Image: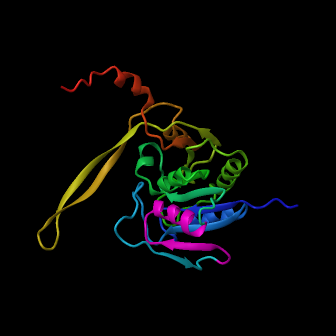
Amino acid sequence: MAKKKPTILVVNDDGITAPGIKVLLEEMQKIGNVVVVAPDSPQSGMGHAITIGKPLRLDKIDLYEGVEMYKCSGTPVDCVKLAVNKIFKGKKPDLCVSGINHGLNYSINVLYSGTMSAAVEGAIEDIPSIGFSLDDFSHHADFSHCRPYVRAIAQQVLDRGLQKATLLNVNFPHISQELKGIKICRQATAKWFEEFDERLDPYDREYFWMTGKFQLLDRGEDTDAYALSNGYVSIVPTQFDMTAHHTITELNSWNFDVK
């Protein structure tokens, strides 16, 4: 008897027409049956936002021949929630993949990323999940060097599974760097130092436009930042339990004697 093909949910945050999601669904079609649910417009930087207090719309579309695709009016996380509840009707897919994002989601950026939050939501639903991102913001980004790695990493997750409550954060260097392979890394320590441009609208009302600079605060050679800058694909095993376990003992020694 032929082995049943796995079912793969493909999501993103750049929107359903983004070139990155097309590359991802094409690679997933080589190893499984694909269902795509993605925002109807770009949702970058949405983090783990969900839609509350207004309707969500989910429409089936025929964007690519032979692919079951839906556009969603909500956030990347909404896409995963609706897919699980309304499309799969509670029967979980075998894999959830998010991306390929136009722009890196390494280091602290994982907290802001809609791409990674969609993958996190997949993991919360007990679906093995992966977020993929490329160091290229261009609409015409070249994903060709990502393709074999995307497929190989997804296949390994399907074959081996992931520990409960964990997922993978995968980032690719720009195509201008020759890929040397894969490095399993930790998340580098970094911070965005924001600035807010003060401007006036045509009615002389003040508004702000956020800008800023990304500053790497970590020189470790075991980080995703180091791997990417040296031509490697970085894989960071990621969890959504944000408990600082190492601080529990210290806090238990504090005096909370409230009079």
Q: Position of residue 212 (x, y in %)?
A: 30, 50
Q: Quadrant of residue 70?
A: bottom right
- Quadrant in the picture for the C terminus: top left
Residue at 53 percent of width and 50 percent of height: 124
Name the residue furthest top.
Answer: 253
- Pick whichever, 237 or 177, lies toward us: 237
Q: Position of residue 97 (x, y in %)?
A: 59, 57
- Tell me residue 232's x, y (percent): 59, 43
**In the image, residue 69 lies in the stretch drawn in magenta:** yes
Assign the N terminus to one quadrant of the image. bottom right
Q: Position of residue 189 (x, y in %)?
A: 42, 36
Q: Write the residue at 47% across / 41% down.
A: 241
**Residues in magenta, as a range:** 65-88
- Total numbered badges shown on the rendered structure: 0
Q: Is residue 231 visible?
A: no
Q: Residue at x 68, y 55 (%)?
A: 151
- Residue at image point 59% right, 66% down: 89
Residue sticking out furthest to the right: 1
Position of residue 259 relative to residue 176, above or below, is above
251 to 240, vertically: above or below:
above
Evaluate whether residue 97 shows in this view. Answer: yes
Q: Residue 117 lies in magenta, yes or no?
A: no
Is residue 196 rendered to the left or right of residue 8?
Answer: left
Which residue in the rendered view is the most extreme toward the front? 259
Along the line of sight, the residue nearer the viewer: 81 or 154 = 81
